[in-house]
Image (tube, rainbow, N blue to C red):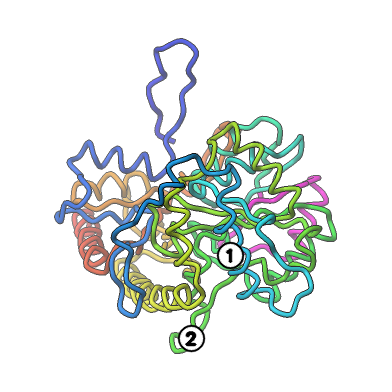
Amino acid sequence: MPQRTQPTIPGFRRVPRTGVIYVMHRAGLNGYTAGDPAWANLGQGSPEVGELPGAPPRIDAITVNPSSRKYSDVPGHIALRQKVADFYNTLYRQGKSSQYSYENVSIAGGGRLALTRIAAALGDINMGHFLPDYTAYEELLTAFKAFIPIPILLNPEKNYKISEKSLQREILWRGLTAVLASNPCNPTGQVIEGEELQRWIEIARDTSCTFIFDEFYSHYIYSGGADEPAKMVSAAAYIDDVEHDPVIIVDGLTKNWRYPGWRISWTLGPKSVIDTIASAGSFLDGGANHPFQHEALVLLDMDVALQETAAIQTAFRAKRDYMLERLAAMGISAEAPPQGAFYVWASLAGLPKPISDGLEFFREGLKEKVITVPGLFFDVNPGRRRSTARYHNYCRISFGPDMATVERGLDAIQRVIKRHG
């Protein structure tokens, strides 16, 4: 893992940059600036935010209600909390006796902050997390000392999936009381859905293990046919009792509505959990952006959300297919093609040295003005307990940008490979 200089001011520890922050910092030192048409940022963790064919009009201006000049309540504005509850009840829980209410919802200033609130509220437990997974989990799982993070390795031979039997064995044998997972997974794009996801919820219930689902890419689903209706995936569809099933869901406007700059997220769970994470929020952050909570209400109208999701899946499926085809022709393989999210977890093993190494591939890419994220950043290693890192021969390549940027970036990658024979 690339190292940073130790702080010289007494009392401060070295805080590592997460994968995307590191690569953007290095790109900046090499002349990158946001919006420079000469560059292609295929390392970005956000989707394109402009107009998409068939999508609802983008919100370009907001009106600030005078009442929102004050602090928001730490759990969030009640109207937005109820709107989130209604959204999930309508989409996933029709006909079920147990329904979400605003008391099952907490609003926070973005996904990482929502997860930070949860982490701050966890007790002295063993918490499972998967490898590879979202780079920011590493410092999140390091900063809070009450729980012990336990890695669960996913194998490419099994398409970065874990069988239900193996998952249950990991929980019981390792004494896990909570499990954190992104679904769809960042970076592999693998999706747990349908009967498999239902069984995961049953395992959570049977083992008394809390499952924390990061569902920020849950509208980027490509497992259905291109001509089928837009599909969304959530654990909320398989919960029996919203107050007693040990399942926590985190999502927000960042990816699924393509408003990353708004920094609005939500957490769904039993009321007792929502109360607890609100207490954590009271000392961590004090509450989410108040004016944007009012503006978010219209985005959660069902017609708006479905229209946006259909447009996302059409546009991003096309970019995914184009990227997979181009990369394969260059000798870069995707052992498990992404069924969700907007990343290709790319194996560089077939490339010549030194660019078969993700870090060298990234460095050489900067010379051609293209940004990728080395795979070693996704070997989540809280506290640097392991001295060796996995995934040196991998990188994450994003098809989050618009198609023109994706094309420009892949052209640059092709030049990198050509230079190395």
- How far from the left and from the top, in percent, is residue 388? 53, 37
Report crowding for label 1: few under 14, some 14 to 19, many 20 or more residues within 10 A (C-alpha): few
The residue drawn where x is 77% and y is 46% is 176
Give the side of residue 90 with respect to residue 175, left or right: left
- How far from the left and from the top, in percent, is residue 114? 56, 46
Magenta span covers which residues?
A: 152-180
Residue 224, compared with residue 342, is above or below; it is below
Image quadrant occupied by the C terminus: bottom left
Give the side of residue 226 with respect to residue 52, left or right: right
Which one is in front, 349 or 72? 72
Image quadrant occupied by the N terminus: top left
- How far from the left and from the top, in percent, is residue 55? 36, 75
Q: Which residue is mark 2?
A: 225
- Residue at the extreme top of the image, as rendered: 10
Element carrying mark 1 = helix
Give the side of residue 113 with respect to residue 260, left or right: right
Question: Which circle's residue, 2 or 1, is located before the other in the chain?
Answer: 1
Residue 233, compared with residue 374, is above or below; it is below
Report crowding for label 2: few under 14, some 14 to 19, many 20 or more residues within 10 A (C-alpha): few
The count of marks equals 2
Q: Which residue is mark 1?
A: 157
The residue drawn where x is 16% and y is 51% is 36
- Residue at the extreme front of the image, as rendered: 66
The residue drawn where x is 53% and y is 41% is 287
Q: On the image, which quarter does residue 322 sit in? A: bottom left
- How far from the left and from the top, in percent, is residue 159? 57, 66
Q: Which mark is residue 35?
A: none
Element carrying mark 2 = loop
Q: Nearer the viewer, mark 2 or mark 1?
A: 2
